[in-house]
């Protein structure tokens, strides 16, 4: 995380990848594998202490601030099922969120 990313704490992070196959796909390139991209997303959610929307062709999910799955649609899901990923967030209190943290993974103390 860099200062410009963490100068103000996020309340919800939207992240997108172009394509993410299912876990363990032998034809997946290392840079597009679910394991690598999801690990990066989980790490970001934990470090920013914000829920994360992981969106890509083939895999979509909501992660909580601890990096755990809340809702998932995997690549193997048939389009005949008409997959829809939905999660409700309370956005009415986002403006009341303190825009910094002194005890988080990336805190103001690191910058001093």
Image (cartoon, rainbow, N blue to C red):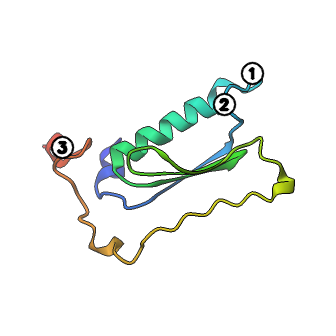
Marks 2 and 1, how far apart at CA: 9 Å
Seen from the viewer's position, the closer of residues 99 and 54 is: 54
- Considering every residue shown, the one lying at the far top of the view is 26
Residue 80: image location, x then y, percent: 87, 55
Whole-number angstrom distance, CA of label 3 to CA of label 2: 37 Å
Under tag 1, what secondary structure?
Answer: loop
Report the residue at 73% width, 44% height from top: 58
Q: Quadrant of residue 37?
A: top right
Kindly identify which numbered label has been placed on residue 23.
Answer: 2
Q: Which mark is residue 26?
A: 1
Identify the disc placed on residue 80. Answer: none
Q: In which image quadrant can residue 85 be found? A: bottom right
Q: Quadrant of the N terminus?
A: top left
| Mark 2 vs 1: CB contact within 8 A | no
Q: Secondary structure at mark 3?
A: helix
- Residue 46: x and y in percent read 37, 43
Relative depth, front residue between 40 and 78 = 78
The mark tally for this picture is 3
Image point 36% across, 50% down: which residue? Answer: 5
């Amino acid at each position: 995380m860099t200062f410009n990313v963490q100068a103000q704490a996020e309340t919800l992070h939207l992240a997108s990848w172009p394509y993410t196959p299912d876990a363990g796909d032998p034809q997946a390139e290392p840079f597009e594998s679910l394991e690598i991209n999801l690990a990066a997303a989980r790490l970001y959610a934990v470090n920013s202490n914000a829920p994360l929307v992981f969106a890509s062709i083939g895999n979509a999910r909501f992660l909580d601030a601890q990096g755990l799955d809340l809702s998932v649609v995997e690549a193997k899901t048939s389009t005949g099922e008409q997959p829809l990923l939905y999660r409700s967030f309370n956005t009415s209190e986002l403006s009341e969120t303190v825009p910094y943290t002194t005890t988080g993974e990336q805190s103001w103390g690191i910058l001093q």
